[in-house]
Image (tube, rainbow, N blue to C red):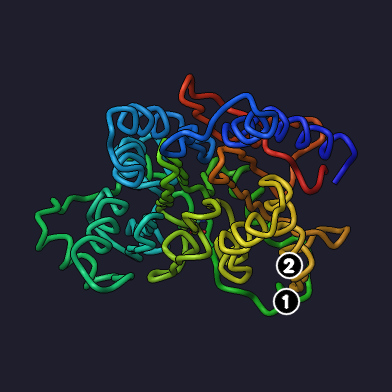
Amino acid sequence: MTPLDRRSFLAASAASVPLLSSIASAQDQGRAKPQAAQSFRPMLIGSGNSIPAVTKAMELMRSGSDPLDSIVAGINIVEDDPNDQSVGYGGLPNEDGVVELDASVLHGPSHKAGSVAALQNIKNPSSVALQVLRRTDHVMLVGEGALKFAKALGFKEENLLTEKSREAWLRWKANLNPGDDWLNADQQIKPGDFNRKQSRAKQLGIPYTTGTIHCSAVDTLGNMSACTSTSGLSWKLAGRVGDSPIIGAGMFCDNEVGSAGATGRGEAVIQSCGAFQVVQHMGNGVEPTEACLRVLQWIADHTKQSFLLDEEGRPNFGVTFYALRKDGAYGSATMRVQKDRPNSERFAVHDGMQARLENCTALFST
Ligand code: GLY
């Protein structure tokens, strides 16, 4: 991390003055009496594509809605948007041209989780995950079982492959091999192949995404919740499950501590139990942005395959973490930003007043 990166994250942390600390310091000075019930600042954070989601969720939380219901309703807006090719309807398909969606939710107060993976034909996997939480004694349903469950509850089956995503899939198929997910023998030894896969796709005008939507929330009662939803890695092998539906990887929440989520290369986030680690760090007193940076560094230290490393031995893929502490302090950090594009990785914040994008702190600048 460059000195500039660290300075900007310290400034961001300072800007997120927790309501509880100000109450506590006023009490220390004898200027305020404890309130009958603790009051928390309602806060929402999310991935850069979650502005519509955090806006809707804050509106619902203000009207008294549960934080998990609120973020799922917000995320539904982005899942329904055909222009976001990383989530829900219009998401980029797997290598067979089939859209398979993953999502998970965790309700802080009850510490119950729900999750679906490789779900086809239902555009709101986050809502199905919420029903797994509410209506079953299970945590995770996958594939056909998840679809059967969703249909039983009245979710409408529909074709999720938009013309735009189908065209992109056909272009990808026509250029197969350097961009698929089957490892070639020489990929074990050639550095930079992951990068090449993405840059080749870019040159050919083929979208390539590990994009996802994540939101974390805390309401005025201090109740927290988390939700992550995705169409996953584009052109993935059929049945591939990413980090988003894995509790502790793509999202995690501990109602007494905080909530976290991830976007980016799911394989790296699963292998690091990413969101769980972020929350654990916060529980140990680490500031939210620093907690995200520590897990990114952990991933960097544990990435061994040469085709996932750049010339300097650093991960050549993207991962971004988002962290919200119970007292409203928040942060986000990303694996890398280009030096000439320091604002390229951003995350969404809603502090009860307005929704805005803030820059993620970068572990590496390239
Ligand atoms: N983070 C999304 C995925 O890898 O599926």
Q: Nearer the viewer, residue 19 or 351?
A: 19
- In space, the residues marked 2 and 1 are separated at their CA atoms by 6 Å
At numbered mark 1, what does the secondary structure look like: helix, strand or loop? helix
Amino acid type assigned to the residue bearing label 1 in the image: Gln
306 lies left or right of 62: right
Amino acid type assigned to the residue bearing label 2 in the image: Phe
Q: Is residue 40 above or below residue 262?
A: above
271 lies left or right of 343: left
Q: Residue at x 73, y 67 (%)?
A: 307
Dot 1 alpha-carbon crowd within 10 angstroms: few under 14, some 14 to 19, many 20 or more: few
Dot 2 alpha-carbon crowd within 10 angstroms: few under 14, some 14 to 19, many 20 or more: many
Residue that label 1 marks:
188
At numbered mark 2, what does the secondary structure look like: helix, strand or loop? helix
Residue that label 2 marks:
307
Q: Nearer the viewer, residue 66 or 268?
A: 66
Quadrant of residue 330 within the rendered picture: top right
Q: Are marks 2 and 1 in contact (CB under 8 Å)?
A: yes
